[in-house]
Structure formats: structure tokens, C-alpha cells
């Protein structure tokens, strides 16, 4: 009764458990990008770049400020009406409104706007790069799960076949057609497959953890993936040169590197503008109020003074740089070196992308051929194993020969699964370099 109760309780728990969420590779990548911390940080960087661009544009507009001051004098002070010294207690306050704007600064502000605009555009490319990196990590973790799920199935199949063979060997031993040593050899093979199954199950568990981690998916929630194990076609001829040219012109990494060079070039021009004079326009209005605490009637009212004491001014000023302790020269040299480093990074990025595109195309073709050969190898190995297994039942071959055929079949199935999944990865990489993003970004 206790055993029946436990079975019923377990069934109730399983029936109430939430069903596993089934996701395709694209859905896993989209989920990871949406919940990625790295992508979230890059979005904040992009938001800062947008604000910096708006701020650089606003620097061309006049800056307006207002001021109010108040003071009380006790003892000897200057009477604003007579400009003579007095010893009475007084109170005074002033009001001002001023505005200023740059007229010329050696194109410093113009280049600052251009650089900020380039930095904003680079932020979009960097955001796409971050999304692509997360998607690539998910893609590889996803295929690891598929591989170990397939490896577990292969191990289960061979363990089941090995147990069947062990039972046959034991019966043949009872009939005197197999020796105890051969039965022990088959039992050893069955134990090896049992160990292999446990090992692959552990690898699968670790692959699930890794996939949830890169997706930022809760480890405690159920997750299932769609096994994209369709037979892949043998790839035909691909124009590698055209794909390289397209990737060098449109890939987000290349676009970002080119924008970095453009931004640093504008920063270099902006630093050189520090050698030019700066011309500014300024204007303002001010007024004041003054009274004597001992004789308030001696001075006009607040409204009268506020109106009559007002004054306006307009001015143009020019600042000519002469010597600044080599700070301008150091700034120019530093920005020039930053530009040179950006140009070197652009060259390195171009070489890396070209190598990656060629590598992906070659691997795509290679894994396609390997998969076709692996399919034939599995078929041949399966026929060989079935034939040797039939002979083993009749006592015509030894357990060692059967084990060798089973090992060959196991390796052939693993090679087929590996080449199939690697082809899938390289296919997605070639599509990525041809302009198809892993996850479509909204700009």
C-alpha cells in the first residue's frame, strides 16, 4: 500500500508540474538577446552617445543665465547715489540676465558635432555586435545540447543492443556454444556502454546548464529545445570572394571599426582647433536697488530704481592662444596617436573578418562532405555490425569481433552527428556574413 501511495503521489506532482518551454534555436537566441546583461549595458552606452550628440549640437546655441544678489552693509560704505562714504546701514540688491555664444573656434564645435554623430552611429553598430556575440554563444551552446542529446540516444541504443547480446551469450554459454571468457567479454562491453551512457548524460546536464547560463534563463525552470536534425544537403560552389567583399563592406564589426577611425580623425581635427583664436558674442541687461535703513524716504521706490537703474551691453571678445604649458601640443599628439591606433585596429579587423569568412565557407563545404561520407559510413557499419551480430548468435565469431564492430558503428554515428551539427553552425555563420543577422535588431 505504501508503494502504491508513493506512485500516486509522484504522479500528482508530475501532473501539476509546469510543462517545459520548447524553443527553437532562433527563439533561444532572441530570448538571450532580450535578457542579456551585456546587451543591456550596450543599450545604455548607445543612449549616452545619443545624449552626447544632442549636447554637442546645443553647444552652438546661446547660453543664457540670470543672477540675483543681495547685501547689507553696516558701518562705513559707499553711497551709490553720491559715491561718497557714509556710516549708515544700507541694503542693496542687483539683478542680471546675460547670454553668450561662440562665433568662431577653429571649427572645434562643428567637428565635435560630427564626432558625436559618428559616435552615435557607432553605438548602433556596437549594439548589433553585442547582440551577435550573445547569439553566437547561444548557437554553440544550443548545438552542444543537441549533440549530447544525440550522444545519449546513441549510447542508449548500444547499451540496449549490448544487453541483448549479453543475454544471447549467456544462453549460448548454457548450451555450451560460448565460453565463460566470451560471456565475460560481452559483459565488459555492456558495462562500458553503461558507463558511456552515464558520461553522456552528465555531459548533457552540463550542456543544459551552459545553455541556460548564456541565455540568462532561470536554472530552475524547465526548458526543451527543438532538435533541428534534418538531413543537410551537400553545399555547392560558393563565391567566397563576393561574400568576403560583402562582409568587409557591411559587417557590423567592420562598420564599427571604420566609424572609430572617422571619429578619432574628427577628434584629431578638433584638438588642432585649439591653436586658433576663439571669438565669442555676449550681451546682457542688469539693474539694482539701494536703500538706507535709517532714512528710507531718501531714495526712490523699488520699482522706480529697478526701472531707472537698468543697463544693457553687447560685446565681442577674442581669445588668442599663446602658451599653455604644452597642453595643446600634447593633446594634438595624443589624438593623432589614437587615430593611428584606430587605423591599425581597422586593418586587423579587416584581416580577421576576411579570414573568418573564408574559414566558414571552407568549413561549410568540408562538413557537408563529411556528413555525406558519415551517412555512408553509418550505413556500411550498421550492415557490418548486423552481419557480425548474426554470426555471433550462431557462434561463428568471437565477442572481440562483435565489440570491434559495435565500436566502429558507435564512432560512425558520433561522426555523423558531429558533422551534421557543425555544418549547421557554419551554415548560420555564412548566412551571418552574407547579411542575415542572428537576431533582427530594431533601430
Image (cartoon, rainbow, N blue to C red):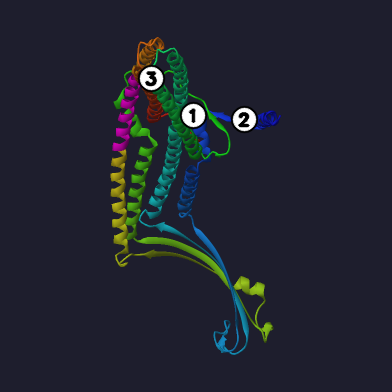
Q: Report x, y in % for residue 235.
A: 35, 19
* Residue that badge 2 annotates: 19
Mark identifier at residue 25: 1
Could you tell me which residue is drawn at 33 percent across and 65 percent down? Answer: 321
**Residue 359 lies in the magenta-colored region:** yes
Per the image, label 1 sits on a secondary structure element best described as helix
Q: Report x, y in % for residue 358.
A: 30, 29
Up-down relation of residue 344 to residue 393 (above or below)? below
Could you tell me which residue is drawn at 62 percent across and 83 percent down? Answer: 90
Badge 3: few (under 14), some or many (20 or more) residues near its Cα, within 10 Å?
some
* Residue that badge 3 annotates: 182
11 or 300: nearer the eye? 11
Res 235 seen here = no
Per the image, label 3 sits on a secondary structure element best described as helix
Q: Report x, y in % for residue 272.
A: 31, 56
Residue 130 sits in quarter = top left
As measured in the structure, the alpha-carbon distance from the residue carrying label 2 to the one carrying label 1 is 19 Å
Could you tell me which residue is drawn at 47 percent across and 36 percent down? Answer: 206
Q: Identify the main secondary structure in magenta.
A: helix
Which badge, 2 or 3, is on the more N-terminal residue?
2
Is residue 156 shown left or right of residue 74? left
As measured in the structure, the alpha-carbon distance from the residue carrying label 3 to the one carrying label 1 is 46 Å
Is residue 128 shown left or right of residue 23? left
Badge 1: few (under 14), some or many (20 or more) residues near its Cα, within 10 Å?
many
Badge 2: few (under 14), some or many (20 or more) residues near its Cα, within 10 Å?
few
Q: Nearer the viewer, mark 2 or mark 1?
A: 2
Res 27 seen here = yes
Which badge, 3 or 1, is on the more N-terminal residue?
1
Q: What stretch of residues is rendered in magenta?
A: 351-371
As measured in the structure, the alpha-carbon distance from the residue carrying label 2 to the one carrying label 3 is 47 Å
Q: Quadrant of the N terminus?
A: top right
Amino acid at each position: 500500500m505504501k508503494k502504491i501511495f508513493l506512485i500516486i503521489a509522484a504522479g500528482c506532482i508530475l501532473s501539476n508540474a509546469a510543462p517545459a518551454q520548447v524553443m527553437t534555436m532562433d527563439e533561444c537566441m532572441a530570448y538571450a538577446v532580450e535578457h542579456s546583461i551585456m546587451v543591456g549595458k550596450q543599450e545604455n552606452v548607445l543612449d549616452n552617445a545619443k545624449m552626447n550628440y544632442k549636447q554637442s549640437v546645443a553647444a552652438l546655441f546661446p547660453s543664457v543665465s540670470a543672477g540675483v544678489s543681495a547685501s547689507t552693509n553696516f558701518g562705513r560704505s559707499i553711497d551709490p547715489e553720491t559715491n561718497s562714504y557714509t556710516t549708515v546701514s544700507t541694503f542693496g540688491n542687483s539683478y542680471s540676465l546675460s547670454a553668450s555664444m561662440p562665433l568662431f573656434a577653429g571649427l572645434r564645435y562643428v567637428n565635435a558635432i560630427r564626432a558625436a554623430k559618428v559616435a552615435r552611429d557607432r553605438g548602433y553598430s556596437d549594439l548589433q555586435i553585442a547582440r551577435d556575440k550573445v547569439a553566437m554563444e547561444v548557437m554553440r551552446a544550443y548545438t552542444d545540447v543537441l549533440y549530447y542529446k544525440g550522444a545519449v540516444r546513441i549510447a542508449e541504443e548500444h547499451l540496449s543492443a549490448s544487453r541483448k547480446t549479453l543475454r544471447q551469450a549467456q544462453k549460448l554459454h548454457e548450451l555450451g556454444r560460448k565460453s565463460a571468457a566470451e560471456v565475460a567479454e560481452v559483459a565488459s562491453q555492456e558495462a562500458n556502454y553503461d558507463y558511456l551512457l552515464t558520461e553522456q548524460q552528465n555531459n548533457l546536464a552540463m550542456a543544459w546548464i551552459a545553455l541556460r547560463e548564456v541565455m540568462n534563463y532561470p536554472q530552475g525552470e524547465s526548458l526543451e529545445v527543438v532538435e533541428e536534425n534534418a538531413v543537410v544537403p551537400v553545399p555547392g560552389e560558393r563565391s567566397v570572394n563576393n561574400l568576403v567583399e560583402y562582409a568587409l563592406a557591411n559587417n557590423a564589426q567592420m562598420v564599427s571599426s571604420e566609424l572609430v577611425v572617422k571619429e578619432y580623425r574628427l577628434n584629431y581635427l578638433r584638438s588642432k582647433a585649439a591653436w586658433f583664436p576663439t571669438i565669442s558674442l555676449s550681451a546682457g541687461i542688469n539693474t539694482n536697488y539701494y536703500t538706507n535703513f535709517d532714512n528710507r524716504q531718501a531714495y526712490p521706490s523699488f520699482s522706480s530704481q529697478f526701472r531707472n537703474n537698468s543697463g544693457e551691453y553687447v560685446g565681442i571678445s577674442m581669445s588668442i592662444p599663446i602658451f599653455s604649458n604644452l597642453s595643446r601640443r600634447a593633446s594634438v599628439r595624443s589624438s593623432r596617436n589614437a587615430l593611428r591606433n584606430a587605423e591599425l585596429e581597422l586593418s586587423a579587423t579587416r584581416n580577421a573578418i576576411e579570414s573568418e569568412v573564408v574559414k566558414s565557407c571552407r568549413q561549410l563545404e568540408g562538413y557537408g562532405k563529411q556528413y555525406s561520407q558519415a551517412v555512408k559510413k553509418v550505413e556500411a557499419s550498421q550492415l557490418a555490425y548486423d552481419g557480425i551480430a548474426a554470426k555471433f548468435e550462431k557462434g561463428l565469431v568471437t565477442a572481440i569481433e562483435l565489440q570491434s564492430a559495435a565500436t566502429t558503428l558507435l564512432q560512425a554515428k558520433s561522426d555523423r552527428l558531429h558533422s551534421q551539427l557543425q555544418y549547421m553552425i557554419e551554415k548560420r555563420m555564412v548566412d551571418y556574413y552574407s547579411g542575415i543577422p542572428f537576431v533582427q535588431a530594431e533601430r
